Image (cartoon, rainbow, N blue to C red):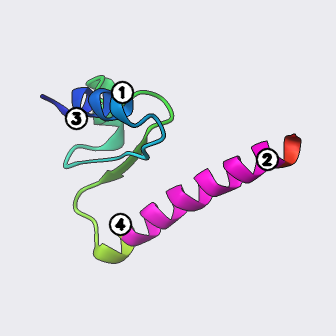
Amino acid sequence: MGGKEVMQEMLAMHPNTLILFTSGCSESGIHTNLILEEGLEFIAKPYSTDALRARVRNILDERSSVTEDKVSAR
């Protein structure tokens, strides 16, 4: 099973799961090969622990702000 298929299975079981793709290919190469869809999160290898930590933090913060915006809109 490839990454896209794993993502689909995970989201089928847990729809709110946050997913970060990683690959040794460039982001444009990943999109060209149809592994990722528009709007999915990605970090290219090689990356440092600090870069991964920052990327995960950013994703969590973005999700938090989207959730807060939805609650405020009610």
Sequence-wise first label, 2 or 1:
1
Q: Label 3 to label 1, Cα distance in Å?
A: 14 Å
- State the quadrant of the N terminus: top left
Report the front residue among 15 and 60: 15
Number of residue marks = 4
Q: Which comes before the other along the chain, label 1 or label 4?
A: 1
Near-viewer residue (74 or 59)? 74
Q: Which residue is at a point 48% across and 40% down the rendered structure image? A: 16
Disc 3 marks a residue whose amino acid type is: Gly
Disc 3 target residue: 3
- Name which residue type carries label 2: Val
Around disc 1, counting alpha carbons within 10 Å, would you say few (fewer than 14), some (14 to 19), or many (20 or more)? few
Per the rendered image, the range of residues in magenta is 53-71
Q: Which of marks 1 and 3 precedes in the sequence?
A: 3
Q: Which residue is mark 1?
A: 12
**Cα–Cα gap, marks 4 and 3:** 18 Å
Question: Gap between marks 2 and 3, in whole Å?
Answer: 32 Å
- Separation of disc 4 and disc 2 at Cα? 29 Å
Q: Residue at x 69, y 55 (%)?
A: 65
**Residue 71 - label:** 2
Q: Which of the labelled discs sits on residue 52, or is there none?
A: 4
Q: Mark 4 vs mark 2: give the one in front.
A: 2
- Residue 31 picture quarter: top left
SS state under label 2: helix
Question: Mark 1, mark 4: which one is toward the viewer?
Answer: 1
Magenta span dominant secondary structure: helix
Marks 1 and 4, how far apart at CA: 26 Å
